[in-house]
Amino acid sequence: MVVRALTGHDVILEALAHPQVRKEARHWRPWAQGEIPMDWPLISWVAPDNMLTADGDRHRRLRTLVSQAFTPRRVETLRPRVEEITKELLDAAGAEGPGPVDLKAALALPLPMTVISELFGVGAEHRDTLHTLMHRVFDTTTPPEVAAQTNADMLALLAQLAEEKAEHPGDDLTSALLEARAEGDEKLSQTELVWTLILMIGAGYETTMNLIANAVHALLTHPDQLALVRSGEASWADVVEETLRWDASIQYLPLRYTAEDVTLGGVHVPKGEALLMGFGAAGRDSAQHGEDAHVFDLKREQKGHLAFSHGPHFCLGAGLARLEGTTALEALFSRYPDIRLAEGEEVPEAPSIVARGAARLPVVLG
């Protein structure tokens, strides 16, 4: 099996815009020939039937049905609730005592998980299971037999959610999607509905979780940059954008496929091959971001990063992620101005080729 990784900003943009670079796995020769087993560790990135793996009119149809929840106006209405959840989590973290606190577990994970769960009507009783399953999806060291079972368990859990909402609809996006499924020519199939829930709920917290944790770690290891924010020379929005560029939550996004022979960055790529989009590498491309692209710099003039992808598949939840990120960071560093990394504690990286984030982030709250 050959997968080509694209790592430069310009060549990724070229691929994203190319009409013969597609998202549907049927264009991938090994997939079409039945050579990809269902226990392949990345199967949950290839097999889904949702807008992540759809092209053209079908992608537009699926995206339109979900986009109502992520308009700028709708996202802004979530601000008070995001602020409330953040305050509750920081209160709880401070009550743990003087010892080190795992900020990922205390804030970075539960904030976006709670927000996206409430948005889609996921009950508290399902959230731990959902997180366990999504962690396995992003963990590309997951054994094959576990990957296959995770795929099945994820489908079963979200099908259960859809069934519960069909019986007892509420003021949430899952209920709205079920209503759309029952109406007109644009309705969702059952498979599309379940896979759409997996995409939106999973992507809605896992990536933002890493954004928050990565930003905190960057600031605590770059005190000169934190000082810029404290002095007002840089904003929390600057922190979020520079973190997205410098330490993107999604490093490599599987997969896109060549529907015909194409030339990308001057390189010939035959029909039927798979492409891995290196969004994280593109964020440190000196051709796009300058010779100091490897430096975390809040005063940098942003020239456009690809952390949320680009074009028709640009992340629907970008506005919500930015809202959660700026809210969490401002509240954290205001509430605990002397926060620091716990001395002698490691900050291990979570094992994943897809995502970039800490397995845990031990800090001492000041």
Image (cartoon, grey):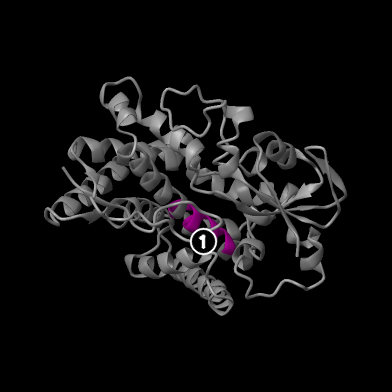
Q: Residue 304: where, in percent of width, then height?
A: 57, 29
- Front in this rendered view, residue 339 or 222: 222
Could you say which quadrant of the image residue 129 lies in? Answer: bottom left
Figure check: 246 above or below 358: above
Stretch of the chain drawn in magenta: 195-205
Instruction: Please give the name of the residue rendered at 64% of the width and 57% of the height, measured from the top-left corner.
Output: 187
Badge count: 1
> Can you give x and y, in whole percent of width and height, for residue 111 in the image?
33, 51
Magenta stretch holds residue 200: yes
| Label 1 element class | helix
In this rendering, does residue 203 appear at all? yes
| Rendering quarter of residue 231 | top left
Q: Which SS type dominates the magenta stretch?
A: helix
Q: Residue at x 29, y 21 (%)?
A: 232
The answer to whether residue 266 is left or right of residue 135 is: right
Asked whether residue 176 appears in the rendered view, the answer is: no
Placement of the C terminus among the 4 image quadrants: top left
> What residue sits 18% from the left and 40% below the top?
336
40 horizontally vs 215: left or right? right
Query: What residue is pinned by disc 1?
Result: 138
Task: From the viewer's side, name the closer residue of 287 and 238.
Answer: 287
Quadrant location of the N terminus in the rendered image = bottom right
- In the rendered image of this protein, does residue 3 appear above or below residue 38? above
User: Looking at the image, is 237 positioned above or below residue 261?
Assistant: above
Q: Residue most toward the front?
A: 344
Please state the horizontal and vertical placement of residue 88, each as a whole percent of the image: 21, 50
Amino acid type of the residue tagged 1 in the rendering:
Phe
Image x and y of residue 192, in percent = 62, 62
